[in-house]
Amino acid sequence: DAMVIQNPRYQVTQFGKPVTLSCSQTLNHNVMYWYQQKSSQAPKLLFHYYDKDFNNEADTPDNFQSRRPNTSFCFLDIRSPGLGDAAMYLCATRKDRATDTQYFGPGTRLTVL
Amino acid sequence: GESVGLHLPTLSVQEGDNSIINCAYSNSASDYFIWYKQESGKGPQFIIDIRSNMDKRQGQRVTVLLNKTVKHLSLQIAATQPGDSAVYFCAEKGDDKIIFGKGTRLHILP
């Protein structure tokens, strides 16, 4: 059974056209992460939520925003996608600060035309 | 700053042999380390983890070794199988963050 769900699995957008990627979880975990992974590279942390507390990485571009309306859902908004934003976007969860195991979703592959 | 890296981008191993994938980390304050396996088109899959108060941890066909003196982490896969073909990442946990190394692609030779 899927625990961390990402929709869609493949997303195509046009240069400069806003796009939203979705992540949902059935684990009731407090922490949710968004990573960007480009070809042949390691996942790069963009930001994470601990409950409703948003934590942005210092080098995450302003073009990337996130929303977490409730425990189960977290969204990644790319306001004006550029060609360099084409990547796999991975969502992950972790129960809380007392636990370590991180659960990843299958990812959304974003293509920018 | 924190960084986790791997020594080799690609490793080729004969089917049935043991594989050893290495990783160096720089943050001596990290207290938890993870190995992930990532197959093409999929998200990272947890393989095994180890805390800094341990030197060795074994799972099914996998062993992780931690050498805190030289800040080195390794993943050993016994009797490598075709299904082990993937990219392997080491990662370290600091506060709420999981920081990934660059990855090693494991090729299995017939």
Image (tube, coloured by chain):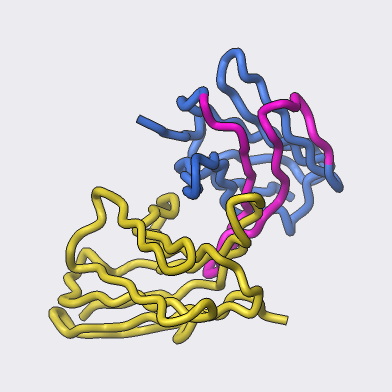
Chain colours: A yellow, B blue
Q: Residue at x 19, y 77 (%)?
A: A79
Is residue A62 positioned above or below B76 on the image?
Answer: below
Residue closest to the eye, B58 or A26: A26
Image check: B109 left or right of A50? right
Q: Picture quarter containing residue A1?
A: bottom right
Outermost residue toward the top in this view:
B69
Find residue A69 and report its horizontal and vertical position in percent: 41, 82
Furthest toward the front, the residue is A52
**Residue A62 locus on image (x, y percent):** 18, 63
* Residue B64 drawn above or below residue A46: above
Residue A68: x, y in percent? 40, 76
Q: Residue at x 59, y 24 (%)?
A: B72
In the shown orientation, is residue B98 left or right of residue A56?
Answer: right
Q: Which residue is drawn at 40% across and 33% down?
A: B2
User: Could you tell whether B81 is left or right of A46 in the image?
Assistant: right
Residue B52 lies in the magenta stretch: yes
Q: Quadrant of the N terminus of chain B?
A: top left
The relative height of residue B70 versus residue A82 in the rendered view (above or below) is: above
Number of numbered markers: 0
Residue A91: percent from left, percent from top: 48, 68
**Residue B61 within the segment the image draws in magenta:** no
Q: Tell me where the magenta segment starts and ends, as one range.
A: B29-58
Q: As rendered, which of A64 and B59 lies closer to the eye?
A: A64
| Residue located at (49% from left, 43% from top) | B95
